[in-house]
Amino acid sequence: MSPPCVATIIVNFRTPELTLDAVRSVLGEPETAEVIVVENASGDDSERLLREGIGGDSRVELIVAESNRGFGAGNNLGAHAATAPILFLLNSDAILHRGCLRLLVKALEEHPEVGVVAPRLLLGDGTEQQDAFGAFPTVGSILRNRLPDVQDPLHPDWVTGAAMAMRREEFLRLGGFDERIFMYGEDSKLCSDYARKGLGTLRVPEAVVTHLVGQSRTSSEAQRSQHLAGRDMLMRSRGTPQWVLNLIALGRRMNDRFGRRFRR
């Protein structure tokens, strides 16, 4: 059994009951050293409900953000407050299955060439979440209007930020999540930053998390806009010229104008 060595960070945005369920699932794992809940300026009764739900558990720290600067910024805030050597980032609408942290810690210990490890994500109905990992987008995949194929499902290019673990020092050395991305795409950009440092991504299917998906999302149009902005920033960071992205955006606007939706 691993000693307590994991700091779990959970960003809350208007989901205090779900957040507390997530916290309880983490506290049941013996590897848990600390849980940091970041209340991301929800503008509702979240802070009071979280304080009441956390009670006097010394392992749980509540940080109240002054403003909502996005999912990545909220996780960065929690990472800087953490002291444990391993970070586990968990969505507020997710629940750990028994043994999850032990398996993720073991994977990081056994694979120094890996920067990010991730569990298998199940939806509420028990089926596997299909969009929990993938390959980096390319100009060709966008023009073909489809996501690129994943060559190795155990070593994808990116994994979702809904549940991912990494070494705290490496995460902070990289600068954490790119806070220019408010939401959507910050996870794939982080994995790309790790890849540029020679550190890969590893999925650990034996480690399982149930993800209820989308409990604190914004409107569909806002989601789409945020997805596209995050994708474009990732592609710029990977060397795609701005003029190419401008052409892609022009094509997208033309499709929208004529009533055809441009899929990611």
Image: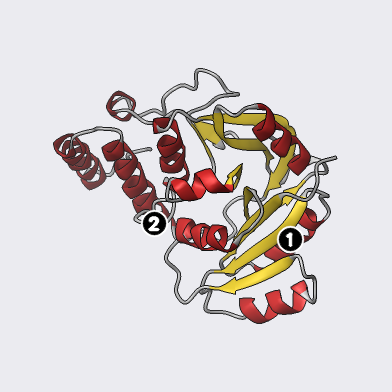
Counting the numbered discs, the total is 2
Q: Which residue is mark 2?
A: 179
The answer to whether residue 259 is left or right of residue 154 is left
Image mark for residue 23:
1
Whether residue 200 is visible to the viewer of this picture, yes or no, is yes
The answer to whether residue 126 is left or right of residue 163 is right
* Distance from Cα at disc 1 to Cα at disc 2: 25 Å
User: Residue drawn 64% across and 49% down?
Assistant: 85
Q: Quadrant of the C terminus?
A: top left
Relative to 48, residue 158 above or below: above
Q: Residues within 10 Å of mark 2 (few under 14, many from 20)?
A: some
Q: Residues within 10 Å of mark 1 (few under 14, many from 20)?
A: many
Along the viewing direction, whichever of 19 and 128 lies nearer the viewer: 19
Q: Which mark sits nearer the N-terminus, 1 or 2?
A: 1
Three-letter code for the amino acid on which mark 1 is drawn: Val
Q: Are marks 1 and 2 in contact (CB under 8 Å)?
A: no
Image mark for residue 49:
none
Q: Residue 80, position in %: x, y?
A: 53, 60
Relative to 192, residue 175 above or below: below
Callout 2: SS: loop
Callout 1: SS: helix
The answer to whether residue 169 is left or right of residue 56 is left
Whether residue 94 is visible to the viewer of this picture, yes or no, is no
Q: Quadrant of the N terminus?
A: top right
User: Residue drawn 64% across and 72% down?
Assistant: 62
Three-letter code for the amino acid on which mark 2 is drawn: Glu
Q: Residue 207, position in %: x, y?
A: 74, 36
Along the viewing direction, whichever of 95 and 165 lies nearer the viewer: 165
User: Residue drawn 58% across and 64% down?
Assistant: 81
Q: Residue 51, position in %: x, y?
A: 71, 78
Q: Residue 251, position in %: x, y?
A: 20, 38
Along the viewing direction, whichever of 264 and 168 lies nearer the viewer: 168
